[in-house]
Amino acid sequence: MADDGRSAELREFAEGWAAAIIDTSYVPMSRREIEDFLLDLSGSLLTALLSEPFDPAPALEVGARLVNAHFTAPEALGRTLQLLGTGLVQPAGLSSEDQRLLDRVVQLLGRLSTGYSEALRERTFEEQEVIKQAMWLATDVAQRRLQDSESRFLAVFDSAPIGLAIGDFDSNILESNQALQDLLGYTREELNALTGADILHPDDIPDTLERYNRLFRGEYPSFRSRQRLLKKDGDVLWANVTVSAVRDSTGVATYQVAMVEDATELHYANQAMATLGMQDPLTGLPTRTAFMARLDSVLGRVDRPRRVALCVFGIDGFATINDGLGPEVGDEVLLKLGTKLRYHAEDNKMLAARLGGDEFALLIEESEGTRTVTPLVEEALRLINEPVTVLGHRLSVHASVGIVERAVGREQPAELLRDATMALHWAKQGGKAQWALFDQQRCDRDRAQLQLALTMPVALDNGEFTVVYQPIRSLGDNRLVAVEAQLTWDHPEHGLLAAAEFLALAERTGLVVRLSEWMLLQACGQARQWQQEFGERAPIVSVKTPPRQARDPDFLPNVIRALADSGLDGGLLRLELAQDAIDCDSEEQVEDMELLAERGITFSIAGLSGHRPECLVARPLTVLKSRDLAVSQVDGERETIPATVTWNTVSLAHQMGMQVIAENVDTLDDVAWLREIGVDAGQGVALGEPVDAEEIGSLLTP
């Protein structure tokens, strides 16, 4: 949207905001001044909404400025939240269905409400201090029969715009003002005949009584709380109540002054915000949006140094439960786990939430360090690991946990959650029911690896990858019989990288299929050149085929196309299969391999263990290529169990009609040992390092 269009929409939005709240409070400004004032606030909110990185902190000031401008009636905040929740996205020119945008709006509303409430409470507290001092002076002066000071106090007391009550510490109401009488629907005489317990909701009495006792003992000068008060007609009034003690010259608390603000609109506005996704409908826990808003509030407190801990839980193997037993069972598992975490959180003053899917979180707002956090996590894991019965199924459910614990600094909530999620990933790598603590150094290493992985597609397009070829020699006469194609990456920052330094990353990110297809095309093209140049002396080219590529539906047509595009004789191509590339339950894999074998292509496998013999025999495998045969792998001793196993492996492969090629042949002792046990060929440092394609000709036997 053009800037002038956005400005017009912002002005229109501010005018609508003014129309919504102008009649809620007395504000010493003209309508035009109010619109200009709200236009400025709208601009601040819009800028915060669109900021990158997102920071909702400016909404705190917006809430405070509303109070300072005298928009202090509860309706003013309620209507503001409703208007902003539905209309702020329009001046931004963005979709109201954008979940990321919705999360930001919710966080802005949360911070605005916090700023508004804090400013209102601060203002109320200041007014209360004035009233308290006036009352103390009035009491003192009354004792001296100074009626004029008492009159001034009563004038302030009666005309205060918020509810006021004076009571003793036996909970008797001694005096109330008109504002409180209007809020509760009682006359002065009726209120004076009641006690505090008569107007408190029964569920709030125990907590409030404890606060009064601590106030009386002098543990703090005042307290503030959100309470439910009972009106004369039986309705419930949600109120922000601030209570202070008035003490005599000896320090004994003789009276209490209560200030009561109507918070009903704010309470129901907060409830309405739940419709924006603040409560998980399955578990009843706060959602990710609500949790992040709370975390943002915790990180935004700067009143004193503090530490926080964030723990992210992920159910181990949840997809197996959900897919194998059905989503109904999966939902029940989530409900039971959420219930366990909620009770655990309530017992230990933590906040539990469901982040989405099978991920949950615990927030410890006042952490005392990892020594106190880890026992809480281990207890949570113990509770989760207890077997549960779900819809007739007895299940053992386990979870892993990622923990981040640190002093509150300048982090954004998303950064803290990101670090905890990374720690969860580490925990899952360690097995089931594990926890891992976030470590910045490990994180830096992982991110460096991730950045390397993310640059691979561009590197492939830029021609940074090349193929080198390692000789495979006959152990009988040292003749070059084949070469293995190997990838290298000439990285602009890290220099020349061998395949071992990046192929595992490519496997994790899925790029390994594209890389392997590219290497196959390059190797076939190069082998065709050797075929034309050297004829029958041309070596077989062996190309590793990762499991993901071997199981790709396009594997067969891609290999056939590589042969066709290059014109290579299939007899000069060998495909190396890892053990986990073999799918013994796949008849289609057998058919594909047989079709390629008919074109002359041969196959090698990296080992014989892990599969039924009939599974291997059913496939056209002609070579066993193993890295576990060299003498260094059997400690150089001929009469050992490993040596015997090696002998038997070579013998079994020969009985199955396969040649045996050893990898990692790095010493002359390796060569001698491999010849002794009947290995046919080998590759490694002792037989030749990988070389460029141009050097292969010089290695061929004339």
Image (cartoon, grey):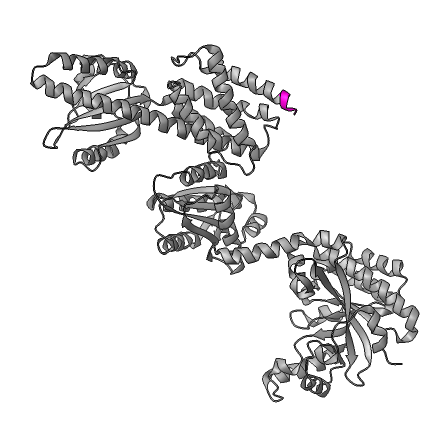
Between 357 and 438, the one nearer to me in the picture: 438
Task: Provide residue 542's location: percent of width, then percent of height.
Answer: 78, 69
**In what quadrant of the picture does the N terminus appear?**
top right
From this viewpoint, is residue 619 visible? no
Task: Provide residue 159's location: percent of width, then percent of height.
Answer: 25, 13
Tell me: 232 left or right of 558: left
Give the residue displayed 50% in from the left and 45% down from the top.
415
Give the residue displayed 52% in from the left and 33% down from the top.
104
Magenta-span inclusion, residue 243: no
Between 119 and 361, the one nearer to me in the picture: 119
Residue 514 in the image: above or below residue 672: above
Task: Provide residue 360's location: percent of width, then percent of height.
Answer: 47, 45
Give the residue displayed 58% in from the left and 54% down from the top.
447
Task: Provide residue 331's location: percent of width, then percent of height.
Answer: 51, 43
Tell me: 230 left or right of 469: left
From this viewpoint, is residue 138 visible? yes
Q: Quadrant of residue 262?
A: top left
Residue 626 in the image: above or below residue 502: below
User: Magenta region: which residues?
Assistant: 1-5
Tell me: 637 left or right of 591: left
Judged by its main secondary structure, the magenta piece is helix
